[in-house]
Image (tube, rainbow, N blue to C red):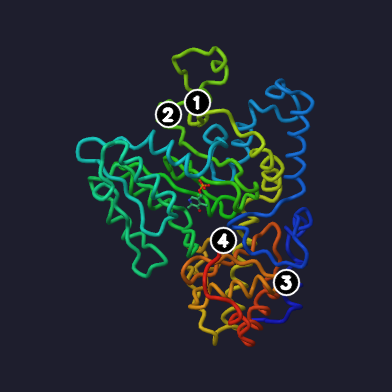
Amino acid sequence: MNTEKSHAKELDQQDELNSFRKEFYLGNDTIYFDGNSLGLLSRRAEQSVLSLMASWKEHAIDGWTEGTHPWYYVSEKLGKLSAPLIGAEADEVIVTGSTTTNLHQLAATFFNPEGKRTKILADELNFPSDIYAIKSQLELKGLDPDEHLVQVKSKNGNTLETTDIVAAMTEDIALIILPSVLYRSGQLLDIQTLTKEAHQRGIMIGFDLCHSIGSIPHHLSEWGVDFAFWCTYKHLNGGPGSVGGLYVNRRHFGKRPGLAGWFSSAKDKQFDMEHTLSPADTAGAYQIGTPHVLSIAPLIGSLEMFQEAGIDRIRDKSIRLTGYLMDLIKSELSSYGFTIANPEDETTRGGHVFLIHPEAARICKALKAAGVVPDFRNPNGIRLAPVALYNTFEEVWEMVSRLKEIMDEKTYKNYANKRGVIA
Ligand SMILES: *Cc1c(COP(=O)(O)O)cnc(C)c1O
């Protein structure tokens, strides 16, 4: 491979998405590779926050129906903007809640243990919050999680095999909940095959898209996925605590929400204030209460950028960025004890590279001191996410060169090999 810095610069010049970078607040002299934990603020997201603040200032209560982005319709409007990112129709998507609360809503709605089918199938590598939510949903139905939660095992501690997941789709499983991309190793699961296999066995299946939405295209409607849910502060750059999203396949429209609230209502019925709920006949039915308008606001500007960039072009650049990063690691860092633990194949590789190293915690601290923001994952993982909308090939080159210096000069030994509060 060409390891010259000038080559990285050439790749940047040829990059069709390079104009988006200047729309972000990049930080002085920092190389930010943590966009899969918290995406950066863009000027457009900032503007849309200011615009919703202005409509509050100007219209007060009438902001629900007036102003540039009337609050009463904003969740649906952003659902429509999110739909192309996951291959859904506009009314199958709603921006609401958070990953965890949306999972609660969808499990409360679609987990209906009956007869022999009383179990939920998940995996042992998923993010803890999903597992806590699933266990509490089982408990709410009077089922013991030790017996009714089945977690597919990983053979190597990093990735899952489709055949193992399919083998666990036994006739006592009522519902399957899996991540699209595993948060540590970045493995992209085969959503289409898993959905087909689940349905052949009469099992419903839903996916957590936290680490894929905004980075990888999906065709959820075409694949027939039953439901999905996600956060918007990672690749979608919605800001800390921005409102999440959910998808419900239209063949389930009309299914009553497990957790109802007045925002589950059909929009024209909601203000009739009746004590009998008339749910929306769209994914909007799975909202609960008043939308968190100020935490939705940044998404208006941010999702507009995704619409302009197009998710296929984003994925294409992301694949090239992570490919370039892995090539450089193999060529420049092969003698320092790093293991590339993400799948390398393009069909199973997500949006980040996952390195394993026994000194990972303090290597991350040394990287931060050297102006690179990685993401440490206990106990020995370093996640590096070069993001298509704002990172460059030159930054990838620069990051590898700084890491090489840290390893050569052993400056990581100046730090304790222990995690901080967050990462
Ligand atoms: C980020 C993430 C979450 C976080 O859930 P919140 O409800 O937004 O706090 C949950 N699950 C996965 C897989 C994640 O990556």
Lateral position of residue 89 relative to residue 321, left or right: left
Q: CA distance from mark 4 to mark 1?
A: 34 Å
Above or below, 151 relative to 252: below
Q: How many marks?
A: 4
Q: Name the residue carrying label 2.
A: 257
Q: Are marks 2 and 1 in contact (CB under 8 Å)?
A: yes
As drawn, the label of residue 394 is 3
Q: Name the residue carrying label 4.
A: 351
Q: Position of residue 98 (x, y in %)?
A: 53, 42
Q: Which numbered disc, 2 or 1, marks the residue that appears first in the sequence?
A: 2
Q: Quadrant of residue 272?
A: top right
Q: CA distance from mark 4 to mark 3?
A: 18 Å
- The residue at the point 40 percent across, 28 percent down is 255
Q: Position of residue 388 (x, y in %)?
A: 66, 59
Foreground residue, 104 or 221?
Answer: 104
Q: Which numbered disc, 2 or 3, marks the residue that appears first in the sequence?
A: 2
Q: Name the residue carrying label 1.
A: 264
- The residue at the point 51 percent across, 31 percent down is 287
Question: Judging from the image, what secondary structure is the residue with disc 1 in?
Answer: helix
Mark 2, residues whose alpha carbon is within 10 Å: few (<14), some, or many (≥20)? many
